[in-house]
């Protein structure tokens, strides 16, 4: 049985998976707050929904072209009123590029509740080491 | 001039640097909440101050023996009342082990204010790609 926090994370990140798998930076970035922070598996930090949209569109069109991702919420908890910390495991299948093959990563995501609902304030992703 | 959020992050993470550089898991873990989440550069997730203490003591005694770290707060902002998101760049110098040499990483850290002051609820670290 899922907790309310888990349900909120699952529902908020659904667009990430849908956006990735349809190669749409715009759909991918939809759940992010306008001033959201994002850190990639390369330790690159960007800020703002617009930067997240453009950055992902760029990789969907090039190195991650044709790739598919699946997200799984492995933990979620309320850390302050209106603030949820979630941990998400992703499985990426990429046909080509630097991550050709199948890879797992683990993301920490922070959701903040505001008048427009729950939005992602912070997303930080790291490749899971193999073996 | 630093913002209040930056000052709080700088002061909260001071123990991390001191703990790492004196190879003390206990000092390193001091700023963490009892139920804090931690994700390493290998995408390994652990939970609780005790696990963070033990996990770091184990690497200080082995693969990171003799290593020194420096932290620099590159951004910090309030994302909800009593909740700060900080981004920290670290420079690690390791004499031996899998990360022998000098490496940079970028961490997202979430601080939550409670009766005991500001504590780290979430720390997620990623190696910065070279070149």
Image (cartoon, coloured by chain):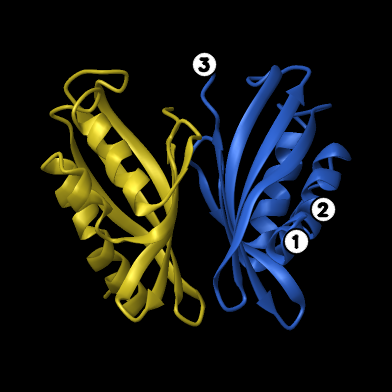
Chain colours: A blue, B yellow
Q: Secondary structure at mark 2?
A: helix
Numbered disc 3: what chain? Answer: A
Of the residues tagged 3 and 1, which is closer to the observer? 3
* Distance between mark 3 and mark 2 Cα atoms: 31 Å
Drawn side of residue B58 relative to residue A5, left or right: left
Residue B14 is situated, as x and y percent measured from the top left of the image, at: 20, 59
Q: Are marks 2 and 1 on the same chain?
A: yes
Q: Are marks 3 and 1 on the same chain?
A: yes
Q: Secondary structure at mark 1?
A: loop
Residue A71 vs A97, above or below: the answer is below
- Give the residue at the far right of this rendering: A22
Q: Tag 1 or tag 2, which sits nearer the N-term?
A: 2
Mark number, residue A131: 3
Q: Secondary structure at mark 3?
A: loop
Q: Which quadrant of the figure has residue B92? A: top left
Q: Are marks 2 and 1 in contact (CB under 8 Å)?
A: yes
Drawn side of residue B81 relative to residue A51, left or right: left
To which residue does mark 1 refer?
Answer: A31
Drawn side of residue B23 relative to residue A16, left or right: left
Q: Residue at x 22, y 23 (%)?
A: B62
| Other-residue count near label 2 (Cα within 10 Å), few / some / many at <14 / 14–19 / ≥20 | some
Mark number, residue A15: 2
Q: Residue at x 78, y 18 (%)?
A: A95
Residue A128 vs A73, above or below: the answer is above
Residue B112 is situated, as x and y percent measured from the top left of the image, at: 42, 71
Numbered disc 1: what chain? Answer: A
């Amino acid at each position: 049985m899922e907790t309310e926090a888990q349900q909120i994370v699952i529902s908020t990140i659904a667009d990430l998976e849908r956006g990735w798998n349809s190669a749409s930076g715009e759909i991918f970035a939809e759940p992010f707050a306008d001033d959201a922070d994002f850190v990639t598996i390369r330790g690159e930090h960007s800020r703002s929904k617009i930067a997240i949209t453009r950055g992902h569109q760029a990789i969907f069109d090039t190195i991650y072209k044709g790739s598919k991702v699946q997200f799984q919420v492995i933990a979620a908890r309320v850390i302050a009123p209106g603030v949820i910390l979630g941990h998400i495991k992703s499985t990426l299948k990429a046909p080509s590029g630097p991550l050709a093959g199948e890879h797992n990563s683990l993301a920490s995501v922070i959701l903040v509740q505001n008048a427009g609902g729950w939005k992602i304030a912070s997303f930080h992703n790291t490749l899971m080491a193999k073996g």
